[in-house]
Image (spheres, helix red, strand yellow):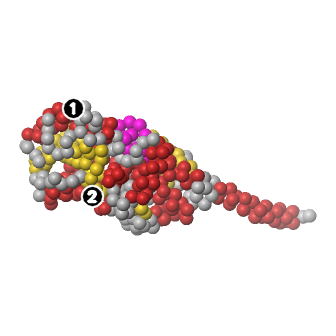
């Protein structure tokens, strides 16, 4: 056989081998796990939100895998603890997209960590479903959130305060991004509700004594006091309220609300503690015809059974975003761009956190009906009533 003939024969053999191997390669690829990344504050001062978020996301994936996975493919979750640190969120996002090669990321869960991580995921074109109302997802991006806007939260609060007859309001706010953004929103919106911001006092997020700020806030004799902050700082505020014997209603921003209140505020909760929040926090009082009640009850029972804890809205948000991610992976597989495109087609997704609607140019899935006004008293959450 001449050289030319031998080359032709070799090409035919290689071609036949490639055709034979192609189905095997395709099968191997189709059997490969679908990879989801989770960035959450599992420890540190923000763990009250990050830990239940991550637990619920894992629970959703475990349930899917028990049912056979997605189109027969197992779902793998890689979770990193940001500890609430923007620097760690940045490092771990880089690792998820470049080394772990996840197809979608759930989280981060607070404004500082979200802002640090999003540029990395956007450059890599990896879809992200983050959990904060403060950061606005960009249109035509790979960024999404199921949370309604921060403005929605403050409108819910101001509407209720107006109905209670509040005309003069003192604000005590942290100096971080949450506090700055909240003060900006209250300044812009309060005149619309006929409410005067009599004084604005500032505190550091880790302050252990806010007596001076609360003393100044009370001096102007406000009808109510509004605390803008997140996490366990609400306990410091409540201790200060008790120490000074303040009787005004205390309203707190959504980010300060958590399922830890029965332990965190034991014996120090003010007589009237109000807050804009989500249906999960008031699940025991939801009417039977509430559109989210069936999903909330199902998820809450499962979360209690597995973790021996009561689910809060942070857990509800983690459950929902994991289910949304897996829903679109049924058609998009592990293709990051297709996942992004299919998320944009999600309509009327009835979740435990809220009902979610995305659309081209609309990357914030939660609407104005996502929030309700709640109250905490006698170790229980219930809908706030106007006296």
- Using the image as rendered, state which of residue 254 and residue 290 is in the foreground: 290
Residue located beneath label 1 in the image: 209
Of helix, strand and loop, which one carries label 1?
Answer: loop
Q: CA distance from mark 2 to mark 1?
A: 30 Å
Which residue of the protein is positioned furthest toward the right in this rendering?
Answer: 1
Q: Secondary structure at mark 2?
A: helix
Point 54% across, 60% down: residue: 329
**The quarter of the displayed image where residue 220 is located:** top left
Quick check: is 78 in the magenta stretch? no
Is 27 left or right of 16, judged from the image as shown?
A: left
- Taking the image as shown, residue 135 lies to the left or right of residue 92, namely left
Residue 52 colored in magenta in the image: yes
Extreme residue toward the front, this view: 288
- Percent from the top left, x then y, of residue 299? 45, 52
Kindly identify the residue that appears in the image at 86 percent across and 63 percent down.
6
Pinpoint residue 254: horizontal percent, then vertical percent. 29, 49
Q: Earlier in the sequence, mark 2 or mark 1?
A: 2
Query: How many labels, in total?
Result: 2
| Mark 1 Cα shell of 10 Å, populated few (<14), some (14-19), many (≥20) | some
Q: Residue at x 35, y 52 (%)?
A: 283
Q: Which mark is residue 152?
A: 2
- Quadrant in the picture for the N terminus: bottom right
Q: Residue at x 43, y 57 (%)?
A: 295
The residue nearer to you, when weighing 57 against 290, is 290
Of 98 and 24, the residue lying toward us: 24
- Which residues lie in the magenta part? 42-53
| Left or right: 122 in relation to 70 | left
């Amino acid at each position: 056989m001449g050289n030319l003939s031998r080359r032709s024969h070799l090409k035919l053999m290689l071609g036949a081998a490639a055709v034979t191997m192609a189905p095997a390669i395709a099968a191997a690829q189709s059997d490969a796990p679908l990879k989801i990344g989770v960035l959450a504050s599992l420890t540190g001062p923000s763990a009250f939100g990050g830990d239940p978020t991550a637990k619920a996301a894992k629970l959703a994936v475990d349930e899917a895998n028990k049912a056979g996975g997605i189109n027969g493919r197992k779902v793998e979750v890689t979770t990193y603890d940001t500890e609430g640190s923007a620097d760690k969120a940045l490092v771990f996002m880089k690792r998820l997209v470049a080394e772990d090669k996840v197809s979608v990321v759930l989280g981060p869960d607070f404004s500082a960590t979200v802002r640090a991580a999003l540029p990395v995921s956007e450059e890599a074109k990896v879809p992200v479903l983050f959990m904060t109302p403060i950061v606005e997802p960009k249109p035509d991006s790979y960024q999404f959130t199921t949370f309604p806007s921060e403005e929605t939260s403050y409108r819910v609060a101001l509407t209720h305060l107006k109905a209670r007859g509040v005309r003069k309001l003192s604000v005590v706010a942290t100096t971080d991004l949450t506090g700055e953004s909240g003060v900006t929103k209250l300044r812009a919106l309060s005149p619309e509700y006929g409410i005067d911001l009599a004084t604005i006092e500032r505190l550091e997020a880790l302050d252990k004594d806010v007596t001076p700020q609360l003393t100044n806030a009370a001096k102007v004799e406000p009808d109510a006091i509004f605390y803008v902050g997140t996490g366990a700082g609400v306990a410091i505020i409540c201790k200060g309220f008790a120490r000074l014997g303040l009787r005004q209603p205390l309203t707190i921003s959504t980010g300060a609300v958590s399922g830890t209140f029965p332990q965190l505020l034991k014996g120090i909760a003010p007589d009237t503690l109000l807050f804009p929040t989500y249906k999960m926090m008031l699940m025991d009082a939801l009417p039977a015809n509430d559109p989210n009640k069936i999903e909330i009850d199902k998820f809450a029972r499962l979360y209690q059974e597995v973790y021996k804890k009561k689910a809060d809205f942070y857990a509800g948000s983690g459950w929902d975003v994991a289910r949304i991610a897996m829903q679109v992976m049924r058609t998009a597989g592990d293709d990051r761009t297709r996942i992004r495109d299919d998320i944009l087609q999600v309509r009327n997704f009835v979740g435990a956190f809220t009902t979610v609607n995305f659309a081209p140019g609309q990357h914030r899935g939660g609407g104005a009906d996502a929030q309700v006004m709640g109250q905490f008293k006698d170790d229980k959450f219930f809908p706030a009533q106007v006296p």
